[in-house]
Image (spheres, grey):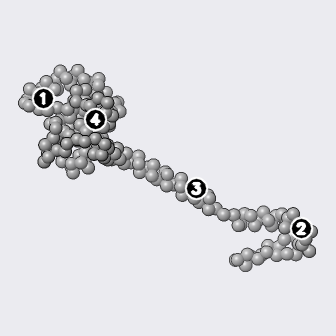
């Protein structure tokens, strides 16, 4: 209509009636066409983008909220399907305890803790510098050690709290209590 106004006789007298019975008179065809573009615009793309962004934010928030549970389930599932480990029978564990400590506390652990625990009796301890499998991912070694140990001992120090893997060990042990052992004290 804008490009071929000369084909319309008395275009300024034409009217456009909408579904809601409102009228627009074509006094100024350019202004009317702009109005129609605004009224008839489709916001489907905008709505789709807003919904998609909202879903990403919600799913991201849920993934962050349940990050330790997701990691725990991932590593237990990975252990189950990608590597054969004999299953324990009726609470018979490979180790009596897994000792979680920061590397800076290693001397204290070796000289004091392990010697005192071994003096108490025949205790099988899982200690990462001795019992982790070389070539295996550290996270897999950690979850296997926790899963195969009757107890988990965390020696919390300032270095422990600053260590990423110590934090990982602590949270995997916590997830093992909640989801792997149904609240059993470990």
**Residue 70 showing in the rendered view:** yes
Instruction: Tell me the distance, in whole angstroms, between the alpha carbons under discs 3 and 4.
Output: 42 Å
Residue at left 7%, top 30%?
121
Residue 109 to residue 95: above or below: above
Question: Residue 142's spot in the image, x, y percent?
Answer: 28, 36
Query: In the rendered structure, which disc, 4 or 2, sits on the residue that comes first in sequence?
Result: 2
- In this rendering, the label closer to the viewer, 4 or 1: 4
Question: Residue 101's spot in the image, x, y percent?
Answer: 26, 29
Please say if the residues under marks 3 and 4 sit with CB atoms less than 8 Å apart.
no
Q: Is residue 24 left or right of residue 111?
A: right
- In this rendering, the label closer to the viewer, 3 or 4: 4
Q: Residues within 10 Å of mark 1 (few under 14, many from 20)?
A: few
Q: Secondary structure at mark 2?
A: helix
Query: In the rendered structure, which disc, 3 or 4, sits on the residue that comes first in sequence?
Result: 3
Q: Quadrant of residue 185?
A: top left
Instruction: Tell me the distance, in whole angstroms, between the alpha carbons under discs 2 and 3.
Output: 38 Å
- In this rendering, the label closer to the viewer, 1 or 2: 2
Query: In the rendered structure, which disc, 3 or 1, sits on the residue that comes first in sequence?
Result: 3
Q: Is residue 37 left or right of residue 168?
A: right
Please say if the residues under marks 3 and 1 sit with CB atoms less than 8 Å apart.
no
- The residue carrying mark 4 is 141
Residue at left 62%, top 62%?
44
Q: Residues within 10 Å of mark 4 (few under 14, many from 20)?
A: some
Please say if the residues under marks 1 and 2 sit with CB atoms less than 8 Å apart.
no
Question: Residue 66's spot in the image, x, y percent?
Answer: 36, 48
- The residue carrying mark 3 is 49
């Amino acid at each position: 209509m804008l490009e071929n106004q000369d084909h319309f006789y008395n275009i300024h007298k034409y009217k456009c009636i909408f579904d809601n019975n409102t009228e627009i008179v074509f006094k100024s065809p350019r202004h009317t066409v702009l109005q129609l573009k605004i009224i008839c615009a489709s916001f489907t793309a905008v709505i789709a983008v807003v919904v998609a962004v909202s879903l990403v934010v919600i799913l991201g928030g849920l993934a962050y909220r349940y990050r330790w549970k997701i990691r725990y389930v991932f590593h237990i599932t990975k252990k189950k399907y990608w590597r054969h480990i004999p299953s324990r029978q009726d609470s018979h564990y490979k180790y009596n305890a897994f000792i979680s400590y920061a590397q800076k506390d290693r001397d204290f652990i070796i000289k004091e803790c392990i010697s005192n625990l071994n003096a108490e009796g025949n205790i099988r301890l899982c200690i990462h510098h001795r019992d982790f499998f070389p070539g295996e991912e550290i996270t897999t070694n950690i979850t296997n050690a926790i899963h195969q140990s009757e107890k988990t001992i965390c020696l919390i120090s300032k270095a422990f709290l600053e260590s990423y893997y110590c934090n990982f060990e602590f949270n995997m042990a916590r997830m093992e209590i909640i989801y792997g052992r149904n609240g059993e004290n470990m």
